[in-house]
């Protein structure tokens, strides 16, 4: 019996970049913020209606968020939702010290603790 070999490609860590999508960093951050919001809602046992009340939106908006339909959500709005759910959101800006990379576009990242 012959064993077939699967080919694969190692991910860059950002599926949107791997797919060649523009604004891959922003899309990745929005997805991660939405995942965190969804986890908080589920962990607290909230219905979508209850979550909508906390977030100040209607239930269909929460449904869209939970299903990953993020095109209508800005990073700022997702951060506002996290704050409404009682999370602290910190933005850190750091100027590059390395002169060789100083002229290049900076990175956009998120970390969850």
Image (cartoon, grey):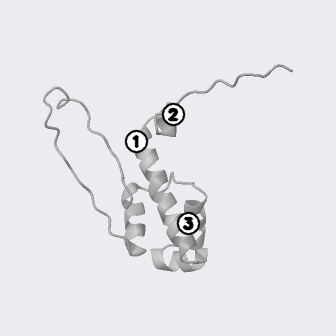
Q: Which of 33 and 60 is in front in this view?
A: 33
Specify whether 25 is left or right of 70. Answer: left
Which is in the foreground here, disc 3 or disc 1?
1
Quadrant containing the N terminus is top right
Counting residues from the N terminus, which is met first, the one under dot 1 or under dot 2?
A: 2
Specify whether 13 is left or right of 104. Answer: right
Marks 2 and 3 close (CB-CB < 8 Å):
no
Which of the 4 image quarters holds residue 111?
Answer: bottom left
Q: At x 37% / y 71%, what residue is drawn?
A: 87
Is disc 1 surrounded by few (<14), some (14 to 19) or many (20+) residues within 10 Å?
some
Q: x, y (%) of residue 25? A: 40, 42
Which of the 4 image quarters holds residue 79?
Answer: bottom left
Counting residues from the N terminus, which is met first, the one under dot 2 or under dot 3?
A: 2
Is disc 2 surrounded by few (<14), some (14 to 19) or many (20+) residues within 10 Å?
few
Q: x, y (%) of residue 86? A: 38, 75
Q: At x 46% / y 57%, what residue is drawn?
A: 73
Counting residues from the N terminus, which is met first, the one under dot 3 or under dot 1?
A: 1
Q: x, y (%) of residue 41? A: 53, 72
Q: Marks 2 and 3, how far apart in space?
A: 31 Å
Point out which mark residue 11 bears.
2
Specify whether 2 is left or right of 17. Answer: right
Q: Which of 42 and 67 is in front in this view?
A: 42
Point out which mark residue 100 bears.
none
Q: In this view, does 108 lie above or below 78?
A: above
Under circle 2, the secondary element is loop
Marks 1 and 2 close (CB-CB < 8 Å):
no
Marks 3 and 1 close (CB-CB < 8 Å):
no
Under circle 3, the secondary element is helix
Q: Marks 1 and 2, how far apart in space?
A: 14 Å
Q: In this view, does 59 lie above or below 96?
A: below
Residue under circle 1? Answer: 25
Point out which mark residue 61 bears.
3
């Amino acid at each position: 019996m012959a064993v077939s070999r699967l080919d694969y490609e190692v991910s860059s860590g950002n599926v949107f970049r791997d797919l060649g999508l523009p604004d891959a960093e922003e899309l990745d951050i929005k997805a991660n913020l939405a995942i965190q919001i969804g986890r908080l809602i589920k962990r607290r046992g909230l219905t979508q209606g209850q979550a909508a009340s906390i977030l100040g939106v209607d239930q269909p908006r929460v449904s869209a968020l939970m299903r990953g339909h993020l095109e209508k959500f800005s990073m700022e709005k997702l951060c506002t939702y996290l704050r409404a759910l009682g999370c602290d959101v910190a933005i850190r800006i750091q100027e590059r010290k390395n002169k060789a990379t100083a002229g290049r576009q900076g990175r956009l990242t998120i970390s969850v603790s």
